[in-house]
């Protein structure tokens, strides 16, 4: 088995590429189910944030996996592989695991040490668990990633200097205006990012805050916390006419502020500059707005240089966290090396149990006069003797499996105790289960293809024979 991390992030792809690969929360369960059905995929987790879309996989073989994952991405996102290949990265096994640990700790974020990513990793893992897309390896690896992420936050000072994306957006506003006194700030969206932004705005002296959200209740709730004013989405043009700074962060898959909308409110503003900061992915604000007079538009990629000073302090703490990650990976590596010992121990126990039962049955046939109680005592005592005989070999093989040459030690242990037959039985059972899963996967894919072909055939027939009555599937 192999572990892969496949994705693109703010380092490899600009926002106009990343937004094409964003997955809305309501679409994630289906995306996971489709990924799990992909050839060779045994376990999977998808992390989709404003700065990255990453697919983590446990696969049964590496050959052709790149082809299958690219095919999945083409189908899921509707983007040709030629278009996204230049931005894609592949990591394997140890490199992939260490990358996940760094992501969870915020070391791979645009704003180093930001804490929001840990919750996003946790949510992605828990969703994958609910969708039964994880197993032995990812249940271990992602729990370790979450643990080391928590340690990074609690055992270091990396989070003391505020440098989140929302903080950077507010810092950009300060650079433009100096201070927020007398300025009207419009927040679009009422999620966690907007709430963090609102807190930074308050700390920066902003007093007049407007909040627009698709759900009016959430807009009122956030506005109430900031002594602001809530507007409905239909009132967005009115709010735009009043604002000096617009900071937008919604989960919308469509543009929220169009060029036409802003152009329509500009006359009412009477040449008053409008500064717009879009920290959403996909973007909320039409990039074409930057062409309008007196409008200054910034997106999430413009924020990277806003917090250089605080980032330097965080980089010092990052060195400490890198040591934590190294320790966590060593713990995983030891666990993984000993993972292979479980089938060997099971094989030993199976063989010992069969010998015990065969020997006991033979003995009881030669002693027919024994009472039921005497048989029970003999069975219990002989079983105890067998368990005591196996205890030290089992402890020793566990120790050997954790050493660097653990694989060779296990192989020698199997040969010395002649456990090949029992291991072959276990492998056959596993292979049969995997074959059954692969057969079910192929059957489902075949049904999906046949269903799609039927729809295409019926629609083609309807187009050719418009006067003939044909039941066209939706």
Image: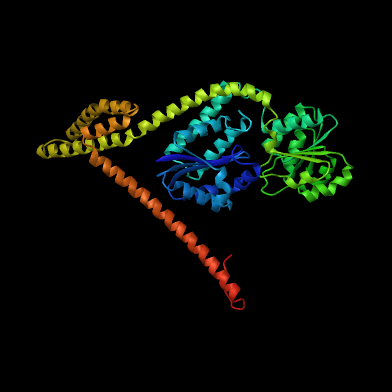
In the rendered image, the vertical position of residue 367 relative to residue 396, given as above or below:
below
Asked which quadrant contains residue 183, the reply is top right
- Seen from the viewer's position, the closer of residues 434 and 297 is 297
- Seen from the viewer's position, the closer of residues 150 and 169 is 169
**Quadrant location of the N terminus?**
top left
Q: Is residue 430 visible?
A: yes
Please give the name of the residue rendered at 87% of the width and 42% of the height, measured from the top-left corner: 269
Furthest-bottom residue in view?
467
Asked which quadrant contains residue 379, the reply is top left
Q: Is residue 33 visible?
A: no
Instruction: Identify the colour scheme used.
Output: rainbow
Q: Is residue 141 left or right of residue 48?
A: left
Please give the name of the residue rendered at 29% of the width and 34% of the height, measured from the top-left corner: 345
Q: Is residue 379 left or right of residue 254?
A: left
In the rendered image, the vertical position of residue 317 relative to residue 471, given as above or below:
above
Q: Position of residue 51 (x, y in %)?
A: 62, 38
Q: Position of residue 76 (x, y in %)?
A: 56, 51
Q: Position of residue 199 (x, y in %)?
A: 73, 30
Please give the name of the residue rendered at 13% of the width and 39% of the height, measured from the top-left corner: 362
Asked which quadrant contains residue 364, the reply is top left
In the rendered image, the vertical position of residue 427 relative to residue 450, given as above or below:
above
- Seen from the viewer's position, the closer of residues 90 and 142 is 90
Q: Position of residue 390 (x, y in %)?
A: 24, 29
**Quadrant location of the C terminus?**
bottom right
Number of callouts: 0
């Amino acid at each position: 088995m192999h572990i892969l991390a496949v994705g693109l992030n703010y380092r490899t792809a600009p926002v106009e590429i990343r937004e094409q690969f964003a997955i809305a929360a309501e679409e994630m369960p289906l995306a996971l189910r489709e990924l799990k059905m992909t050839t060779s995929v045994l376990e999977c987790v998808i992390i989709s944030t404003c700065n990255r879309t990453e697919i983590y996989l446990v696969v049964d073989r590496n050959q052709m996996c790149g082809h299958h994952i690219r095919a999945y991405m083409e189908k899921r996102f509707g983007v040709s592989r030629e278009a996204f290949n230049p931005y894609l990265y592949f990591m394997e096994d140890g490199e992939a695991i260490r990358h996940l640990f760094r992501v969870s700790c915020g070391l791979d974020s645009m704003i180093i040490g930001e804490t929001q990513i840990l919750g996003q990793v946790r949510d992605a893992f828990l969703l994958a668990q609910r969708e039964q897309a994880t197993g032995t390896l990812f249940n271990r690896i992602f729990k370790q990633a979450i643990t080391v992420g928590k340690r990074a936050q609690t055992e270091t000072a990396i989070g003391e200097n505020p440098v989140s994306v929302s903080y950077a957006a507010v810092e950009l506003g300060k650079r433009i205006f100096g201070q927020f006194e007398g300025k009207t700030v419009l927040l679009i969206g009422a999620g966690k990012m907007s709430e963090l932004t609102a807190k930074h705005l308050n700390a920066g002296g902003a007093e007049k805050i407007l909040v627009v959200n698709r759900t009016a209740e959430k807009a009122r709730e956030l506005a109430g916390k900031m002594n602001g004013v809530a507007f409905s989405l239909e009132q967005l043009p009115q709010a735009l006419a009043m604002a000096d700074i617009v900071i937008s962060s919604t989960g919308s898959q469509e543009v929220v502020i169009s060029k036409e909308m802003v152009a329509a409110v500009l006359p009412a503003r009477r040449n008053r500059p409008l500064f717009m900061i879009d920290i959403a992915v996909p973007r909320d604000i039409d990039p074409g707005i930057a062409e309008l007079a007196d409008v200054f538009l910034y997106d999430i990629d413009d924020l990277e240089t806003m917090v250089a000073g605080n980032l330097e302090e965080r980089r010092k703490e990052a060195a400490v966290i890198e040591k934590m990650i190294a320790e966590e990976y060593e713990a995983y590596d030891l666990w993984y090396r000993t993972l292979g010992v479980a089938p060997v121990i099971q094989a030993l126990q199976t063989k010992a149990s069969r010998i015990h039962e065969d020997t006991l049955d033979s003995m009881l046939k030669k002693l027919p006069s024994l009472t039921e109680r005497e048989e029970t005592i003999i069975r219990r005592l002989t079983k105890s003797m067998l368990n005591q005989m196996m205890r030290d070999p089992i402890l020793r093989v566990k120790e050997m499996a954790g050493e660097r040459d653990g694989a060779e030690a296990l192989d020698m242990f199997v040969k010395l105790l002649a456990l090949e037959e029992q291991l072959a039985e276990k492998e056959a059972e596993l292979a049969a289960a995997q074959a059954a899963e692969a057969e079910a996967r192929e059957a489902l894919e075949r049904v999906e293809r046949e269903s799609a072909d039927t729809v295409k055939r019926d629609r083609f027939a309807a187009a050719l024979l418009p006067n003939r009555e044909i039941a066209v599937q939706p």
